[in-house]
Each structure stands twice: as structure tokens, then as C-alpha cells.
Image: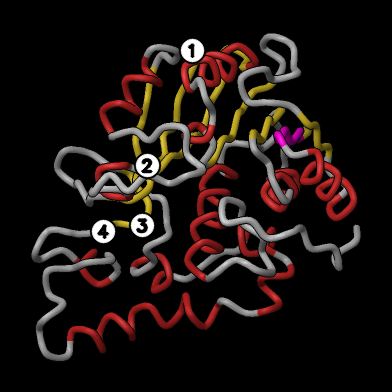
């Protein structure tokens, strides 16, 4: 491996050595969530980018991981830096045979493709039965409430639109959230959500700062150089309790207005 390589910075790609703290941890904890599904599985990482996530899933025990990215530069970088398989291709035409992988991982990809339906159909095509896909996308009602669209996005979806798209191609969907913007008034989640109702209370800002200290202190140059270790690390109870970047289960009784939606989709 050549750890000294750094991929050119892009606003829409997480570069461990260059991206800001929020971007870094969001991507790390999405891959941490996905890693629980990959042991002894054949894994496809769509829009694998810099390659750190594919490496982490390989270390987590996948039988093999193949990364696919539209950027040939990113694929070449991933091969040189992490010695993983990187293949240049579009998301709507995945260069794999039918039913050839057990798990598909796709983070912040579907909003970038011109034809989301074709992309999700391709993901289902390459999956074995049973098979699992872990996919994320911004929740446009929270991420972009005023319609100021991201110039890199071809489309953005509400929670219901995202769910309906996935239901057309998968047998079951479980929805999770990441980076909550708000929380119920008396929920502990107020201590790590972005815009809690308690913000104006005296001393609340200091309490939030105390709760976020473990994540701030964990964001070191060493961690940035070895992101796969952060993905696979065991964080303590305090980290987990007040970590806004953890992927958490969503349901009607526990809505948290998450900026990012993460779906676990199954083919039976």
C-alpha cells in the first residue's frame, strides 16, 4: 500500500486527509454501519471513490470487495493506495454478472445518476438471492428545504420518494437516519441534533459542547491517514450516546428529521 497518495479534492467526494470533520465522520459511520453485513460476503461498493470504504469492508471479513466508480482517476488511486479492485463504470451499467454479489453498498450515489430507477434496478440485478443492499441519500426535505439544489445532484428525494423507489425493486426495506436536524423536546437526541429546541437556554450550548467533545478529540491526523481503522473501531458508550453521525433506526415513534437517509434493502 502507498499511504502517501492523496486524491485530488472534490466537494462531492470524501478525501480523508482533506475533508472537514462532519464530512469525514458521516462517511466513516456509514461504512461502519455497512460493515456489519459483509462478513464472508461478496461485496460491491458503488461509487467507491477514494477507496477507504472498500478497504474497510475487506478488513471486516468480506470474501472479496469490488469497487466501481465513474472516475478512472479514483479507481487508479484506490488500486495504488489500498491495493483493492477498482473498476471504472457508470452506476446504470454495472459491469458484473447477474446475482454475482451478496451485498451492494451505495452511499450518496443515487442522487448523482441521471436515471435513479435504472441504477436501483442494476443493483438488484447483480445481487444474489438472498441479498442485501445498503444505500444512502440526502433527505431533501431536511437537506435542501428551500429548493437550493446542489449543482452536482441530478435529483433529490423525500423520504417517501426514496422508499417508493426502493420498494419497486426489493422485497423489504428498513429505513435508518443519520445527522438529525431536530429531536423531540425532551429527547437526549437534542444534545447532538443540529438545531435543537433548547438552543436558547442558558448553558445548553456548553452542555452540547461537552457531549460532542469525544468526537472532536477523535478527529486527528492519524485517524485521517487510516480511515479504515476508524470505520472498524469500537467506540465507547459516551461516543455512541451523543454521536450525531451514527446510523440509527427510524420508525414512526422515533422520528428525528435526519439529514441523511440510509436504507437496508433485502431480496429474498
Q: Which residue is drawn at 69% across and 31% down?
A: 43
Whole-angstrom CA distance, mark 1 to mark 2, is: 22 Å
Residue range of the region highlighted in magenta in the rendering: 65-70
Task: Provide the secondary structure element on which disc 2 rests.
Answer: strand
Q: Which residue has dot 2 on it?
A: 261
Q: Earlier in the sequence, mark 3 or mark 2?
A: 3
Whole-angstrom CA distance, mark 3 to mark 2, is: 9 Å
By secondary structure, the bulk of the magenta-drawn segment is best described as strand
How many labels, in total? 4
Whole-angstrom CA distance, mark 4 to mark 3, is: 6 Å
Q: Which residue is drawn at 85% across and 63% down?
A: 5
Q: Which residue has dot 4 on it?
A: 181
Looking at the rendered image, the disc whose residue lies closer to the viewer, 1 or 4, is: 4
Looking at the rendered image, the disc whose residue lies closer to the viewer, 3 or 1, is: 3
Q: x, y (%) of residue 171?
A: 41, 14
Whole-angstrom CA distance, mark 2 to mark 4, is: 12 Å
Q: Which residue has dot 3 on it?
A: 179
Task: Provide the secondary structure element on which disc 4 rests.
Answer: loop
Q: Which residue has dot 1 on it?
A: 268
Residue 198: quadrant of the picture: bottom left
Circles 3, 2 touching at the beta carbon (< 8 Å): no
Amino acid at each position: 500500500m502507498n499511504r502517501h497518495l492523496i486524491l485530488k479534492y472534490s466537494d462531492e467526494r470524501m478525501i480523508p486527509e482533506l475533508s472537514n470533520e462532519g464530512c469525514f465522520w458521516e462517511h466513516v459511520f456509514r461504512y461502519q454501519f455497512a460493515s456489519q453485513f459483509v462478513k464472508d460476503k461478496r461485496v460491491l461498493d458503488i461509487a467507491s471513490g477514494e477507496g477507504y470504504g472498500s478497504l474497510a469492508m475487506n478488513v471486516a471479513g468480506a470474501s472479496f470487495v469490488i469497487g466501481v466508480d465513474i472516475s478512472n482517476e479514483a479507481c487508479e488511486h484506490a488500486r495504488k493506495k489500498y491495493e483493492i479492485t477498482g473498476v471504472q463504470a457508470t452506476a446504470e451499467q454495472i459491469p458484473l454478472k447477474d446475482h454475482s454479489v451478496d451485498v451492494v453498498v451505495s452511499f450518496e450515489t443515487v442522487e448523482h445518476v441521471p436515471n435513479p430507477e435504472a441504477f436501483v434496478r442494476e443493483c438488484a440485478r447483480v445481487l444474489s438471492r438472498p441479498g442485501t443492499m445498503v444505500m444512502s441519500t440526502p433527505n431533501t426535505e431536511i437537506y435542501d428545504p428551500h429548493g437550493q439544489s446542489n449543482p452536482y445532484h441530478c435529483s433529490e428525494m423525500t423520504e417517501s420518494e426514496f422508499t417508493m423507489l426502493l420498494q419497486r425493486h426489493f422485497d423489504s426495506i428498513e429505513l435508518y437516519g443519520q445527522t438529525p436536524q431536530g429531536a423531540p423536546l425532551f429527547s437526549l437526541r437534542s444534545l447532538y441534533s443540529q438545531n435543537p429546541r433548547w438552543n436558547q437556554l442558558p448553558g445548553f450550548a456548553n452542555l452540547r459542547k461537552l457531549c460532542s467533545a469525544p468526537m472532536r478529540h477523535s478527529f486527528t491526523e492519524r485517524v485521517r491517514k487510516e480511515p479504515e481503522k476508524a470505520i472498524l473501531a469500537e467506540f465507547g458508550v459516551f461516543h455512541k450516546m451523543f454521536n450525531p453521525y451514527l446510523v440509527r433506526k427510524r420508525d414512526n415513534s422515533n422520528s428525528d428529521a435526519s439529514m441523511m437517509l440510509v436504507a437496508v434493502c433485502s431480496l429474498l
